Image (tube, grey):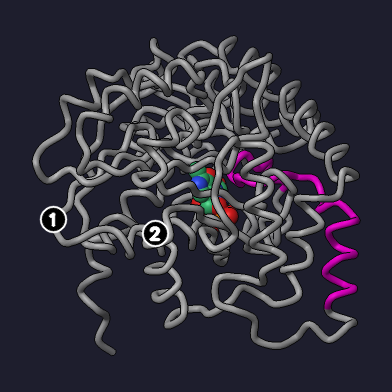
Amino acid sequence: MQIARRLDVISESITLAVQAQANALKKQGVDVVGFGAGEPDFDTPDPIKEAAIAALRSGKTKYEPTAGTPEARTAIAEKLRRFNRLDYSPEEVLISVGGKHSLYVAFMATLNPGDEVIIPAPYWVSYPEMVKLAGGVPIFVHGKPEHDFKVSPAQLTAAITPRTRMVIINSPSNPGGHTYHPQELAALAKALEGHPQVMVCSDEIYERLLFNGQTTCSWASLNWDVWKDRTITCNCLSKTYAMTGWRIGYTAGPAALIGAMNKLQSQMTSNITSFCMPAIVSALTDPANEVQIQTMRTAFEQRGAHMYKRLNAIDGITCVRPTGAFYCFASIGGLLHKPLGPAGEICRDAIDFSRLLLAKAHVAVVPGNDFGFDDHIRLSFATSLSQIDKGLNRIQAFVAGGGAE
Ligand code: PMP
Ligand code: GLU
């Protein structure tokens, strides 16, 4: 069977691959501690589930408009106005099959072959791969751990060439766990304002997961007059409402962009699952869901602080304090090229380290290679404090020469 050449330029998602490996080991009866999955360990709030069940029962089982029902698009536009200070109309919103699909359709609708897309590193694994599938060229700008991985306006502008068409901003960030303060975003925006050919894709999916009083804001709200026409605002229900499996994402942008994305999506997936549309309205309008959002946020804040403290207490590991999302992105630079684990094996990079850690200590982490840092690992703290302690005990013992208990 012939496989298309366009797939030669991309690799499989490492985050999903690690999750699959950990699940396969668990199925064999191995007690794996999973720090791989980037998904809340909470269930979807009941009112959202009830809305979908009621919709299914009432026969909402047919095709819907490609971009989403008017009710769902209106609920999103109102949420964007209320919460994000963005003035999109319902017609400027398109609902897609998860945040990933929203981003993919957005890149496919905006990038021409050879267009350069500036991606601050560390970055979420799928950005460069999706950009390449759309014919674009990823250009990486590396944030430094000593600056909490944040890039400066000067770094961004230095990377701009006549071929630059887009910058991807993700605050709070996966995998860095860092968050740009509104003033830091404003400084980046100011630097980009003088480059009118450059759009910004703002991935705001972790907007509700902020810790220790950290704040951030929507990119286009920084200066609506300048940025409305140059911003693709992406979001989803996956993380905020613990709805990763539902596959609901949305994009807001100027009418021309949403029209182009709608055209593409109409030949691709059509509408998202019909009976999920009323669940969107429930998620974004029923105040009862706020209670769970706050419960999750508080739990993640506590878990993140704990994991961060424990990681930094291990010789050879250092970690930046997470201010958002639910990841610790830790340097294992101090552990490479040294004997590790029960057999004193040598790791050259994070892929070696993660493989050995899973095999010998039964802890699943994601190697940082596909996030742009081959001496870092990503650990999700969207799991219980007891699992965090169990996993960190194992990592500590493994680094000191032990294996799984
Ligand atoms: N953006 C970022 C930064 C992510 O971490 C993820 C992972 N879920 C997505 C987008 C995609 O979200 P979804 O699961 O809704 O496809
Ligand atoms: N975004 C999550 C993660 O980074 C889910 C997996 C994925 O879609 O990459 O782990």
Residue identifier under label 1: 114
User: What secondary structure is found at the residue carrying circle 2?
Assistant: helix
Q: Which residues are magenta?
A: 31-55
Q: Is residue 21 visible?
A: no
Q: Position of residue 122 (x, y in %)?
A: 38, 32
Q: Is residue 207 visible?
A: yes
List the single residue furthest toward the front.
225
Query: In this orientation, which residue lies closer to the viewer: 243 or 369?
Result: 243
Residue type at mark 1: give it. Gly
The residue under the point 28% across, 90% down is 1
Q: For disc 1, does the CB lie below 8 Å from ligand 1?
A: no
Q: Quadrant of the C terminus?
A: top right
Residue identifier under label 2: 106
The residue under the point 75% across, 21% down is 302
- Residue 85 belongs to magenta span: no
Q: Are marks 2 and 1 in contact (CB under 8 Å)?
A: no
Residue type at mark 2: give it. Ala
